[in-house]
Image: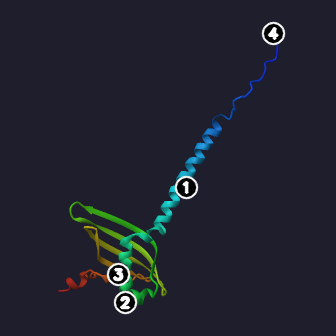
Amino acid sequence: MDPYAEQQPEENPRPRRGCLWGCLGTLIAAVVVIGAIYSYAAWYFYKGFADDPRIQTVMEQVKKSDEAAAVLGKNISVQSRESYSYDYATGRGGTATYVLKVIGSNGEGRINAELDIRDGKTKVTSLVLVDGTGRSHYLVGAAPANPMIQNSI
C-alpha cells in the first residue's frame, strides 16, 4: 500500500455535533419542564382552587349571609386565593386559614376565613368580609372586643 495514496472515506461517517447541541438540548428540556411546573402552579393558585371543598364550604356561608349580599350584591364568586395556611394538630385535626378575593354585582372584597377541621368535617369558625373601603363585616363569629370600651372605667 502506497503511503501517499488517498484514504478512502468511511462509508457512514459519525456526525460531529459536539457539546453545543447536547448542552442546548438539555437546556431547552429544562426550560420546558420548569415552565410547565410554573404554569401549573400559577393556574392552581388563581383558578385551580375552584374544586377545593373547603373553599366551597366558605362560599356557601358567604352566599347565605344577608350582609354579604348587601355589600357585594348578587352572584358572589371567588376571583383568586390570596393566601392559605394549614396547621395540623396530631389527634385533634387541624385548622385552616384562607384569604380569598371575591367579587359580586356591587363590587369586590376580601374574605378572611378560619376553619376547624376534625374527622374530615369542616366547620367555619370565623368569617370576615372586608369590603372595598376597608370596613370589616363579621359574617360568622364575633367581632373582637374594643379595648377602649373595656378600659373606660
Q: Mark 1 belongs to which amino acid?
A: Gly
Q: Mark 2 belongs to which amino acid?
A: Asp
Q: Residue furthest front?
A: 11
**What percent of the width, then of the height, locates residue 76?**
45, 82
Q: Is residue 29 above or below residue 48?
A: above
Which label number is shown at residue 2?
A: 4
Q: Mark 4 belongs to which amino acid?
A: Asp
Gap in angstroms between the C-alphas marked 1 and 2: 43 Å
Q: At x 32% / y 64%, what residue is drawn?
A: 86
- For the residue pair 143 and 56, the one nearer the viewer reads as 56
Which label number is shown at residue 90?
A: none
Mark 2 = which residue?
A: 66
Q: Mark 3 belongs to which amino acid?
A: Gln
Q: Earlier in the sequence, mark 1 or mark 3?
A: 1
Is the residue under label 3 in contact with that under label 4 (CB below 8 Å)?
no
- For the residue pair 28 and 56, the one nearer the viewer reads as 56
Gap in angstroms between the C-alphas marked 4 and 3: 95 Å
**What percent of the width, then of the height, locates residue 56?**
38, 75
Q: Quadrant of the C terminus?
A: bottom left
Q: Earlier in the sequence, mark 2 or mark 3?
A: 3
Mark 3 = which residue?
A: 61
**What percent of the width, then of the height, locates residue 43?**
50, 65
Give residue 54's quadrant in the image: bottom left
Mark 1 = which residue?
A: 35
Give residue 19's quadrant in the image: top right
